[in-house]
Amino acid sequence: MEPFVDRARRFNRFYTRAIGMLGEGYLGSGFTLAEARVLYELANRAAPTARQIGQALEMDAGYLSRILKRLEAQGLVTRVRAEDDRRSHRLTLTGAGLQAFAGLDQGARDSMSALVAHLPPPALERLSDGMAEIEALLTARPAAEPILRDRRPGDLGWIVERHARLYAEEQGWDARFETLVARIVAEMTAAPDPGRERCWIAERDGQRLGCVFLARDDEETARIRLLLVEPAARGLGLGRRLVAAAIAFARRAGYREVVLWTHRELHAARRIYAEAGFRKTEEWQHHDFGPVSTGETWRLVLRRAALDDARED
């Protein structure tokens, strides 16, 4: 955090100097920056109240009141008691106030134009995108809780694409893995059995964050397939939620056990499986996707076979 804070402060020092905020008056005018912002709000709102301006600027009520009194004393602002609320007043700019704002507005435009005049159009676009990104990040609302939903049109292509890209980047696996994922997806959807098979997509604010399939191996056994969580969404517990959803569905569908195939290198996934009660029953080495990997079979028993139940009775 400290390097970021230092970098942000450095940028603030640069930018406040670049746009002329360090002079005696904003843009060489007789107004402070706060007064200029109040004039801007008055010019761009239809007879607002002081409270509305204070909320828009997140400005202390006492400080705003002193600014408004100074602007009134200069003949720039007038106030009239509001007809819909006799306890408050509507504020408007006088002719002199409108003229003062027009000068400030044009000065700000001229100053910014001069600041970036040397930049070519591609650089201006980058700068604009960067400012939009800063604004979006600093005003973002708290992220919504991710949801698990059924698959929709477009999800299957995303599942294949994200598996191929992430495993190539993180494990060095080649195109043979993408082919395998595509085949699994095709098999899962060629003859759907919604009572015994299902796909879940983890999503937040319309953005896909992860997925998992539960497939039918045979009448007694279900298989967890294609568990994936996007790097940006890791640490939120989504992998555990996806696996738990698949296990709960397998119980309701009447399966006796759930099996899955994973790799020793996938440490986070293996922790999730172990915490859910899976136990490793087999391992082998292969190089099916390029680098040598250790494949593993894990199993979770959901209920004993009928013969075991009868013996216990």
Image (cartoon, helix red, strand yellow):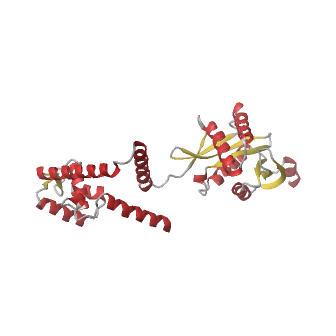
Residue 264 lies, in percent from the top left, at 77, 55
In the rendered image of this protein, does residue 215 appear above or below residue 6?
above
Residue nearest the viewer, comparing 36 with 147: 36
Residue plotted at (54% across, 45% down): 207
Q: Residue furthest bottom?
A: 2
Residue nearest the viewer, comparing 258 with 50: 50
| Residue 115 visible within the image | yes
Residue plotted at (68% across, 49% down): 248
Residue 145 lies, in percent from the top left, at 53, 52
Residue 300 lies, in percent from the top left, at 77, 52
Does residue 135 appear to the left or right of 150 in the view shown? left
Does residue 24 appear to the left or right of 301 in the view shown? left
Residue nearest the viewer, comparing 180 with 303: 180
Does residue 102 appear to the left or right of 138 in the view shown? left
Residue 38 position by quadrant: bottom left
Residue plotted at (18% across, 61% down): 30
Residue 76 lies, in percent from the top left, at 13, 55
Q: Residue furthest top?
A: 190
| Residue 82 visible within the image | no
In the rendered image of this protein, does residue 193 appear above or below residue 249?
above
Query: Total of numbered circles in the picture?
Result: 0
